[in-house]
Every structure is written in structure tokens, then in C-alpha cells.
Image: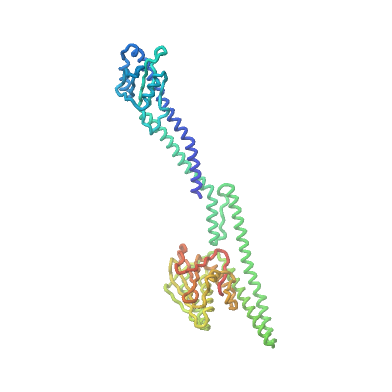
Amino acid sequence: MRRRLVISYLLLMVLVLIALETPLALILATRETDRVRADRLADATRFASLAGPALRGGSAGPLESELRSYDELYGIGAVVVDRDRGTVVASTSWRAAAGTTVARDAALAGQQVSGPESVWPWLRGPVIVAVPINDGGEVLGAVVTASPSAALRRTVTTWWLLLAGIGMLAVLACVLTAFGLAGWVLRPVTELDAVTHEITKGDRSARVQHHLGPPELRRLVASFNTMADAVSDVMDRQRAFVAHASHQLRNPLTALRLRVEELGPSLTDPEGRTEHRLALEETDRLALVLDGLLTLARAEREENERVTVDAAEVAASRVAAWRPLARHRSVSLGLVTRDAPAYARTVPTAVDQVLDALIDNAVKFSGAGGEVTVTVATCDGGVALEVRDNGPGMTASQLGQATERFWRAPDVQNVDGAGLGLAIAAVLIDASDGRLTMRAAEPRGLVAGLWFPGPDDGPKPPGPDTDPVPQRLPTAVPVAGARQ
């Protein structure tokens, strides 16, 4: 934007310079030409006064020596002709040039002639002057001079170069002034852009300095800061409400479950016992939802605090923790560590919670005889983790909704889970500047890929070509789980 402003200022300045300097350049060329023409007319008039007696007496007299001296001194050719256009006296360097015949005929007609009107640097013709020789009102002949225009062209060129130099200095001053002015005008916009990116990355305390730039932009900055404060306050209140509501609901929910459990021994009807069991399951499900909401609220409150962890060690501990459940469900859970240690810089507990959510989903949906493999490797300046299972997998449309909050695949609505597992994972991955990709495995199953930046916090590398369905993780926007 600064470049466009500078270009607009520069274009305006160039147009003003052209409008001012072009007429001035024409006036200077005409002025210099008029000066030379006036001088040559005076010389030719003097020669005409000397040529009158020579033409009447038939003798050149002193006129020939005058023309020769004039030619030697100034290099200007001159000729005196009679009324019959015959040459009476001519200087040494006199040569007829374009325009001399017309000028001679006009002088013999009683007119003073000089040309051209203006000498331009690219024209090389001489300055021609013709003066009639009069005697008592009778034209006896004419004096014609042809002056070389090289000196005049150099003078005009010098003036034009001087004007061009002044114009270039003006343009340079305009460019320097334009950069300073554009920087002053756009500095609030630049600060606004930088602060917007900082807020997008999670720093909700970033604000723009309100004393920069013109008054209109200062008002815009003040309005932006007010809006950022309001949005930050609303988000804090929303997250606090979710956390407090989830926490406060746990006590009555626990009391409700205890009362429902106490009703069990008093139920003798088989249908009543079935309903009693289903009620207990629903209270357990509601407890899971509240736990998930609490975890999600805590994850969203993270202010991008980063810690360095060994992802290989964390993966080994999580696989060891989930292996008993996997054996209970007849699922093979294995770990492949290609690089150890594999250090990643993430928000606290990000690797732990994300692996818990993915391994839980994989073990839950693989079924008896299924296989789940967790792989850890370093790549692209960070750490890549992959959780692969051979379960039913998901369709392309389901993959697109996999990280929406509370979303569950239509065919697993009756499976235990709150639909918040991948929502929490997505928030933690996004806060860590990481990446989550999910794709169908061959011949069946699902592959969930993770990437976390290394300790140097370099820029995120592009996604691998093998991940056909990348999931874009929004910043500070809650997303939901897939199958959990």
C-alpha cells in the first residue's frame, strides 16, 4: 500500500512538472532564437546601409572587406544580391541553404525575413536573415545571412538539461517526502495489521498504539482497541461460564447418580431394572460431557505458553497406558519409534491429550482383532506422529466434519463418547502451531497424522503429499471431535 501511495504522489508530481516545465522550455528556446535573430537582423541592416552606394555606383567598395571580416570573425556567411537576383558580393563561407531563396525573394519584395521562429536541439538548419536594400523607397537588392545554429542549439540544450535536472531533484525530493508521508499515514495501518496477526495467533493482549498517524486513523485504532477489548472480555466470560457451569453441574450430577443407585435394590420389575441401568449410563455419559467441556475450556484458555517435550517418550508412556484396555478389547496396540529422542515445542500436555484422544478412538472403533500402530519420527524441522488403525474408517465428507464439536458419525451414535475428544485435540494442536491431518488408510481404517514444531519454533512446513484430506484448524474458534 505504501508503494501505491508513493507512486500516486510521484505521478502527480511528474504531471505538475510536465505542466510547468514544458511551456518554460518552449519559452526559453524561443527567447534564445529571438535574441540571435535580432542580432543578425541588426548586422544585416548595417550591411544593407553599406550596400546601397555600392549598388548605385556599381562598385563593391568597403562592403566586400566588411563581409569577409564578418565571416572570419563570426563564421557567418553573407551575400548581397541585386534586384535581378545576381550576386554582387559574397563572403568566403557563403553557401545557399534551404530557405535562403525564399528569404531572398521576400527581401527583394521589400520585407525583412528571419527564421526559423524557434531553434530546437534536434534541428540542424541555419538561422537565415534577409534584409532589403532601399534607396528612396526603391528596392535595389537584398542582404542575406546564414548563421550556423550549433551554438544556439547547445544553449537551448543546456537550458533544457538544467530544467530536467531541476525536475529530477524535485522528483527525488517528492519521493523522499512521499515515503515519509506514506509511512506516517500508513503506520497505524501497519501496526493494525501486525496486532491483528498477533491476536489471530492467540495473543489477545496485543493492542495498537493510539497516538500514531492522522486523526482519522487514530480514531480507527481506538475503535479497534475497544473492539478487541470487548471481544476478549466476551471470550473470557464465555470460557469462564463454560468452566464454571461444568464444574457446578458435577455436584448435583453426582448426587443424582447416588440417588439413582439407591433406587436399584428397591426395583423388582425387570423392565424397571433395565430403565434403572439406562439411567445410570446416561448419568455417566453426562459426566463425560462435563469432563470434556472442562478440559476444552482449560485448553482454550492457554496463552501460548510453550514447553519442550520428548514426543517419543510421551508416545511410549501413552501406548503403555492404553495397552491394558487394548488387550481387554482384543486389539493389538504397538509403537514404532523411528527417531529418539524427538523433541517438540508445544503447549503443556498437548502431545499427551492428543494421543489419548486418537488412541482411544482407534482402540474403540477397531473392534476385536484390530491393529493400532503409533509412529513417531522427526521431519520438516519438527516431530511427526501417526496413529493408524484398521477399523471402519470414515468417508471423505465425514473427514471434513471430524473436528466439529459434538459431531459423531451417524453409525456410532450409540457408542460411548461425548464427541469432544478431537475438539480438545484440535485446540491444543492449533495453540502449538501444529497440524492435524486425517485420511483413509489402505485397504481400510483411518490414519491420523500430527505434526508439532521443533524447539526452534520455525515456520510450519507444508503438509506432506500423502495426506489427501488436510484439516484446517481454526485459531481461537472451538472445533469438535469426530467419533469419540
Residue lying furthest front: 84
The image shows residue 171 at horizontal and vertical percentages of 46, 41
Colour scheme: rainbow
Q: Give the residue furthest to the left.
A: 92
Number of labels in the image equals 0
153 to 169, vertically: above or below: above
**In the depicted view, which residue is nearer to us: 154 or 352?**
154
The answer to whether residue 91 is seen in the rendering is yes
Q: Is residue 384 above or below residue 85?
A: below
In which quadrant of the rendered image does the C terminus lie? Answer: bottom right
Q: Position of residue 456 (x, y in %)?
A: 45, 64
Residue drawn at point x = 55 percent, y = 59 percent: 199
Task: Tell me which residue sits at (29%, 22%) in the image.
Answer: 92
Q: Is residue 314 visible?
A: no
Camera-nearest residue between 253 and 126: 126
Q: Position of residue 59 (x, y in %)?
A: 31, 13
Q: Pick the residue in front: 324 or 110.
A: 110
Place of residue 230 in the rendered image (x, y in percent of width and height, measured from the top left): 62, 58
User: Which quadrant of the structure image shows residue 258?
Assistant: bottom right
- Above or below residue 79? Residue 206 is below
**Would you identify the image quadrant in which residue 202 lies?**
bottom right
Left/right of residue 7 with respect to residue 416 in the rendered view:
left
